[in-house]
Image (cartoon, rainbow, N blue to C red):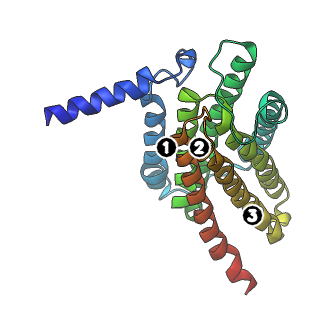
Amino acid sequence: MAAIINAAYNAYRHIFYDLRDTRSDDWFLMNSVWAPLSIIAFYLYFVLSVGPRLMKNRPPMKLDTVIKIYNITQVILCIYITERSLTLGWARKYRWFCEPVDYSNTLDAYLVMKAVYSYLLVKLFDLLDTVFFVLRKKDKQVSFLHVYHHAGIFFGTWIIMKFLPGGHGTFLGTINSIVHVVMYTYYFVTNTWPEHKNNIWWKKYVTQLQMAQFLLVALHAAPVLFIKNCNYPRTIAGLMAFQYSFMFLLFWDFYKKAYRKKTE
């Protein structure tokens, strides 16, 4: 047993200390893997346990103004991330089929790293989606798909930021930010003008757009697995291809249940 514990500890030290990108060690959340894991643990505890118990005998909270501010802030932040990712990489110099990470101390590498870090902070901000659902007693919205997606993408982005802050994997942040500009614009419109909630095609096509992003990210990650001498980790590319194929299937299942029955 002692040998197993020692091996596990050595593996932990090797991964999270020897292999890490040290340039971000002094940044908020980036000095230890226990920081994001603690946030995720608290998030899960609140939205799955303490939050519902806290609201059980209370009326739903009125958060319309807060949510309007939250949605428009998300639109602004996602536009910023989209501009940064296109200007610094995907619209200027990144190669679409294999783009390694620049670990140098050049200005370009630093700006890319800052953009990835900004995206990480936005994914932390995203966790408020579920908190609002709990406080408004929208229990059906706190599904496995919703919670898994939010917790998973936050931790996945932390991993990318800690080990691969740039390169091929940043395509996810680009396409996700574009989708979120559309999604949070939709949320802002329907929260500000509730009569538009009856336009079911709005939500339907937002869901289709979300599904398309997962498929695109999975397809974009796949070539790294087959290109020789691509200086980007195949393990990470494979995990991304698997993860976002899985996300596509989860959203596809949700889409069938939410919309196909309504049109039959």
Residue 167 visible? The answer is yes
Task: Tell me if label 2 and label 1 are in contact, CB under 8 Å.
Answer: yes
Q: Marks 2 and 1, how far apart in space?
A: 8 Å
In percent of width and height, residue 146 lies at 57, 56
48 with respect to 124 (left or right): left
How far separated are the C-alphas under marks 3 and 2?
22 Å
Give the residue pinned by disc 1.
43
The residue where tag 2 is placed is 127
* Quarter location, residue 140: bottom right
**In the image, what residue occupies the spot 79% across and 36% down?**
90
Numbered label attached to residue 208: 3
Instruction: State the residue at coordinates (54%, 28%).
Output: 163
Q: Secondary structure at mark 1?
A: helix
Q: Amino acid at mark 1?
A: Tyr
Residue at position x 53%, y 21% in the image: 21
Quick one: label 2, few (<14), some, or many (20+) residues within 10 Å? some
Which residue is at the front of the view, 100 or 117? 100
Q: Secondary structure at mark 3?
A: helix
Q: Amino acid at mark 2?
A: Leu
At x 82% / y 38%, what residue is drawn?
79
